[in-house]
Image (cartoon, helix red, strand yellow):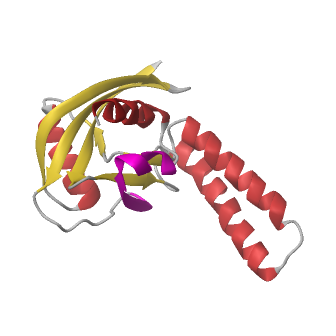
Amino acid sequence: MKRIEVVAAIIRKGDRIFATLRGCGEGEASVRQGLDQNCLNLAECEQARLEGKAGWEQACLEGIAGWEQARLEGKAGWEFPGGKMEPGETPEDALKREIREELSTEISVDEVLCTVEHDYPTFHITMHCYLCSLLTEALHLNEHEAARWLSIEDLDSVKWLPADMQVIEVMKGKA
């Protein structure tokens, strides 16, 4: 099984935590094609509903089912921002680089929260998670579909990727 080592930023601002939505068009080319089709189904569903066309319910069900499958496979869903470490890079340097690339902002890597190991259907992920704070207020979503600032109580309000769900449990245990 393919093994991937990544870093993730749990960015805090007051009592809120920053979450990002990995959505359509992310990942390897073979993955992207499947996600694009799921998103197309959802877009077609909404358009058909608005136009009152027959069959819009089935298009919605297919799109939602496809998106949920992609979430369980680690291809789409809510996550903590971050990414793969490059050879020779420290986890802290990788995290700062990834956040600059994904969010066009600067962070302080404050402390290690946990390391998560998770098996997805086609790969194993080792995710080093760090509590971080913003050094600049501006955030720009360069690679994600959406973002939210969530309180600890609101963390369950979004559909997290399975590996990130383990991080949520660690955070709840420390709250």
User: Measuring 10% from the left and 58% from the top, which residue is drawn there?
Assistant: 135
Q: Quadrant of residue 79?
A: top left
Question: Is residue 153 one of those drawn in magenta?
Answer: yes
Q: How many marks?
A: 0
Left or right of 66? Residue 106 is left
- In this rendering, the answer to whether 162 lies above or below 28 is above
- In this rendering, the answer to whether 15 lies above or below 110 is below
Extreme residue toward the top, this view: 1
Q: Nearer the viewer, residue 56 or 16?
A: 16
User: Measuring 57% from the left and 36% from the top, which residue is drawn there?
Assistant: 72
For the C terminus, the image quarter is top left
Left or right of 84? Residue 88 is left
- In this rendering, the answer to whether 119 lies above or below 163 is above
Find residue 55 and report its horizontal and vertical position in percent: 87, 65
Q: Quadrant of residue 10?
A: top left
- In this rendering, the answer to whether 49 lies above or below 31 is below
Q: Which residues are magenta?
A: 144-157
Find residue 39 and report its horizontal and vertical position in percent: 62, 59
Find residue 38 and report its horizontal and vertical position in percent: 65, 54
Find residue 59 and report its horizontal and vertical position in percent: 78, 60
User: Measuring 18% from the left and 60% from the top, which residue is drawn there?
Assistant: 105
User: Measuring 85% from the left and 76% from the top, which residue is drawn there?
Assistant: 53
Left or right of 144? Residue 46 is right
Question: Is residue 149 one of those drawn in magenta?
Answer: yes
Q: Quadrant of residue 51?
A: bottom right
Q: Nearer the viewer, residue 82 or 89?
A: 82
Q: Nearer the viewer, residue 172 or 22?
A: 172
